[in-house]
Amino acid sequence: MNARHADTPAQPAPSATTPTAFAIADSATTEVAPAVADANGERASARVATLPPLPTWNPFSLWYSDGWTVTKRNMIKIKRSPDMLVFAVIQPIMFVLLFSQVYGGAIAVAGSDYTQFLMAGIFAQTVVFGATFSGAAMALDLKEGIIDRFRSLPMNASAVLIGRTNGDLVLNTISMVIMMATGLAVGWRVNTSPPEFLAGVGLLLLFGYAFSWVMALLGMSVKSPEVINNASFLILFPLTFVSNAFVPSETLPTALRVFAEWNPVSSLVQAVRQLFGNLGTAPVPDIWTMQNPVLTVLIGITVMLLVFVPLCIRKFASISSR
């Protein structure tokens, strides 16, 4: 046995330049360990791998990344449930056909065709009704325990709300495109420049986004998803129907006319008619909100965001801590 081992040539010891299982070539991610003695008594150094430093994330980047991740989740839900989008646009299309083709001949609008008068109201109604998806989705997530799952993740608490309201914004954008195509089919036209048209579309989408925070707070406040539809209609129907969306406000009784003239939806409708060139020759009511509709809507959007975004975040935090 000893002679056999004596005849066996000695294996060369690993040197500092011989790669091992733990060696990597990049010197930026390696460090040299203390020298050790090899089989021949010589000194050799081993190169051991170290992990690269983790990237540094500022709070805004983390907040944006979390919000975008939840937004993509909601977009996937719409992709997998196209019926959600179908039913979101069927009702406004029915309103367009009903009012323009059935009631249009019975409703007179001074200085304008009723279809031109109607479409701005339908657009406003679409974005306001579209905001209810935030409230319904929040109530459903609470019931199904999705919020409890989010609590276990290292994510910003407001990301759930941001992703939900962003989902409404995308859904409203798709609905708006379909509604405008329907309007063009029944004779509606834009009579202003492209920048004014784009400003009108942006104003509608911004108002719908801000209003979705109102509905998200309502969705977190009700006890079950079944309640959210009835609760939301108590808000939506007075805002949309007691306004200048479908009939001129001056034709309403005095109490309703005052409410309609100070209704934020009326200001939105008036602003969109102005930006789309659908005002006609009818006199504008001598009310500040009607004389300055674009500024009124921008103030309303700012107030809704400043008030309801913190309220929603606080409500969500209180629910998550239960």
Image: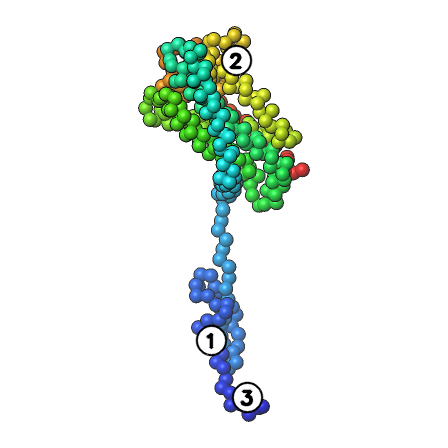
Residue 15 visible within the image: yes
Q: Amino acid at mark 3?
A: His
Secondary structure, mark 1, is loop
Provide residue 42's location: percent of width, then percent of height.
49, 79
- Would you call the spot at circle 3 few (<14 residues within 10 Å), some (14-19), or many (20 or more)? few
**Residue highlighted by disc 1:** 15
User: On the rendered image, what quadrant is the N terminus found in?
Assistant: bottom right
Secondary structure, mark 3, is helix
**Residue 47: which numbered mark, if any?**
none
User: On the rendered image, what quadrant is the C terminus found in?
Assistant: top right
State how far apart marks 2 and 1 are (Cα): 89 Å
Q: Amino acid at mark 2?
A: Phe
Provide residue 58's location: percent of width, then percent of height.
49, 44
Looking at the image, tell me whether mark 2 or mark 1 is earlier in sequence order: 1
**Residue highlighted by disc 2:** 259
Q: Closer to the observer: label 3 or label 2?
A: 2
- Check if mark 3's residue and mark 2's residue have beta carbons within 8 Å: no
- Would you call the spot at circle 1 few (<14 residues within 10 Å), some (14-19), or many (20 or more)? some
User: Who's the residue at 33% across and 20% down the image?
Assistant: 191
User: Who's the residue at 57% across and 45% down the image?
Assistant: 154
Q: Closer to the observer: label 2 or label 1?
A: 2
Q: Amino acid at mark 1?
A: Ser
Q: Residue furthest front?
A: 102
Q: Is residue 133 above or below residue 263?
A: below
Provide residue 205's location: percent of width, then percent of height.
45, 28
- Check if mark 2's residue and mark 1's residue have beta carbons within 8 Å: no
- Would you call the spot at circle 2 few (<14 residues within 10 Å), some (14-19), or many (20 or more)? some
Q: Nearer the viewer, residue 154 or 168?
A: 168
Q: Nearer the viewer, residue 143 or 24?
A: 143
State how far apart marks 3 and 2 are (Cα): 105 Å
**Residue highlighted by disc 3:** 5
Q: Nearer the viewer, residue 141 or 106?
A: 106
